[in-house]
Structure formats: structure tokens, C-alpha cells
Image (tube, grey):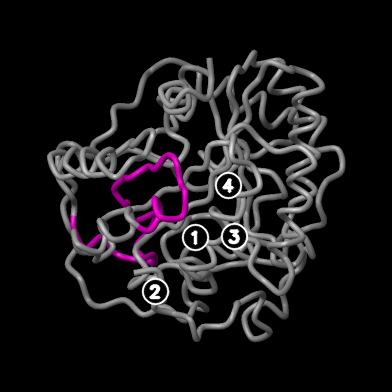
Amino acid sequence: MTQSADRSIPLQVLSPTGDAGLQPGNKQLAGDKIARSPVQFADAPVLRKPSWIRVRIPSNGAVAALKSKLRENRLVTVCEEASCPNIHECFGHGTATFMILGEVCTRRCSFCDVAHGRPKPPDPSEPFSLATTVADMGLKYVVVTSVDRDDLRDGGAQHFVDCIAAIRARTPSTRIEILTPDFRGKGRMERALEILAQNPPDVFNHNVETVPELYRNVRPGADYQWSLTLLQKFKAQHPNVSTKSGIMLGLGETLEQVQGTLRDLRAHDVDMVTIGQYLQPSAHHHPVLRYWTPEEFKALEVFGMELGFSHVASGPLVRSSYHADRQAMEAGVAA
């Protein structure tokens, strides 16, 4: 099951009809973003969130304090931009997933709350600002991700390497996980892998996001097999670096399709996997078609470990970067 269901769909980057009037840095959000996407949603009832999805919001000021530090250093977190349900827990104990290369994405994925538009050029001071913030926060483990940058020849790979180098120069003991885009495009994957080899991370993460049968509506412009190949090629070049991927449930997939995707990830030498419940960011995004139960997530964790993953994080509120330090430690990556 390694062939994508959307092999004929071309890479969609800044379509002239939807983006011609956009200025660099301007954002399309929610309805404006999804209305210009080729996805089609079947009519679906609005499902009531079950009790295991509810998130308790702490009353302390840790979130506001950390947000203040991030704004001071002109940094962005995917925790905020993607409306992650775990933001209060993670910010509450001083951890965050940093999003580099701006806050405007060149893709229009129907599940994602990150804005679409024409990104600004990469900020050359961002690696230094990121390293400074990581040092100030005393982080021992940091996750660095980015929006898709199809406008860049290397997809942003050099900026990732610059950030890795800056963090290691400032705090050499900090373990670094990068969560990258797919680097899709002619010659882009090869170029990106060559650049990343200059200073590879401690964990290389790239999410397949969903089962291949749903790519047309969930990840337009992406390709399932391309993502699998990226993960496998990175592992082949860096056999001692752990690889990681993640999928969401609740978009219309079947158990058999999820199990097939997990088998594909192991067959492409992925070491760790995260499995979480999809939550609809707005009424304009892809609807939640089903809430999987905690028991079903637990069964998938057992299934994944039987396949040979070194770590499987599976639960309704699990996200790709949720407790990433703990996942890495349990997998033997971080001390």
C-alpha cells in the first residue's frame, strides 16, 4: 500500500487565481484559505466532542509569560499558529515547538489552521534569535518546524541547518528534533537532503498526516509516496539518527487503512510514530467524521510496537511534538 491515491495531482503552489493580489506576509485564514483549495467535503453532521477530548486550562500566567518572551525575540510557535489543544500544558511547563521561516504557508491543507499566502523572505537573524531563546529558557530538547516554503529552491533546508548550528553553538547539550515539510518539487528533495547532511538533527520528523486514500482532500499538493521516500532516504544517509512521523485520525479513514499506513512507515525505516485525534480548527476546515476512543488509540499503540517501532505515542490529544522530549528519551535518543 505504498502508492498514493493522488499521484496525478500536481504540486499546488501559489495559484495565480487565488494569490495574485496577495502581498508577501499577508495571510489567508479559515474560509478565505479553504475556499480557494480544490478539496471537497461531504456533508457531515457536527459531532459533539467526547469527554476525553476536553482540555483543562490552567489558571497560572505561564502561557502569557512565554508568549511575551517569544514576541520579544520575534519568534513564532506552531503551538499558537496551528491552535494546538495542548498549548496550555506545554507552555505551562516551559516547552514549545518553534516555527521558523515565517507564519505564512504556500500550501492550503484542509486540516491545518496555519495561514496561506505569499511568504516573506527568510529572516537571516532568526537562527540567532531562536538559539538565544532556547538558551534563555534552558531547554534540553527543542523541536523546530516550519511552514511549507515551495517558493524556495531548497524548501528552507539551509535555514533549518542554520538554526541547528546556532542552537548547538549556544547550548551544545540541547537535543534537536526538526519537523520538516516534504521538500517536494524537481530536485528539491535531493538538494534538501544534501544540505541537511551538513548538520543533521538528533531526530528527523516528517508527518504523512493521514492515510493515502484521503490525500486528495486532506493534503492537496502533497504526495504520500514522496513523504515515505523522504523519510527512508534520510534514514539511509543517517542510520544513527532516529526518524519519526505522525498521522491524524477522524478524517474518514478505516482501521485497516491506518494499520496499512503504519506498516508502510516501518517498511520505510521510520523509528517513531505519533497517532492523534484530528480536531477541526474552524467550520471551514475538514470536518471531524469520527472521534476514535482511547481504547482504540491504545490498540494502535500495541499494534505499532508489534511492528517494531521504537516508540509509539497514540492517544486522542497526542500531537507530533507533544512530549517529544519524553518520546525521544524513551526511544533512547535524549538523556
Mark 2: few/some/many CA within 10 Å (<14, 14-19, 20+): some
Residue at (41% x, 22% y) in the render: 330
Q: Which mark is residue 276?
A: none
Q: Which mark is residue 182?
A: 3
**What residue is pinned by disc 2?**
217
Q: How far apart are the alpha carbons under marks 4 and 1?
A: 11 Å
Q: Which mark is residue 235?
A: 4
Residue range (magenta) = 264-290
Residue 296 x/y as whole percent: 15, 45
Lower sequence index among marks 4 and 3? 3
Q: How far apart are the alpha carbons under marks 4 and 3?
A: 15 Å
* Amino acid of disc 4: Lys
* Amino acid of disc 3: Asp
Q: Nearer the viewer, mark 3 or mark 1?
A: 1
* Amino acid of disc 1: Leu
Lower sequence index among marks 4 and 1? 1
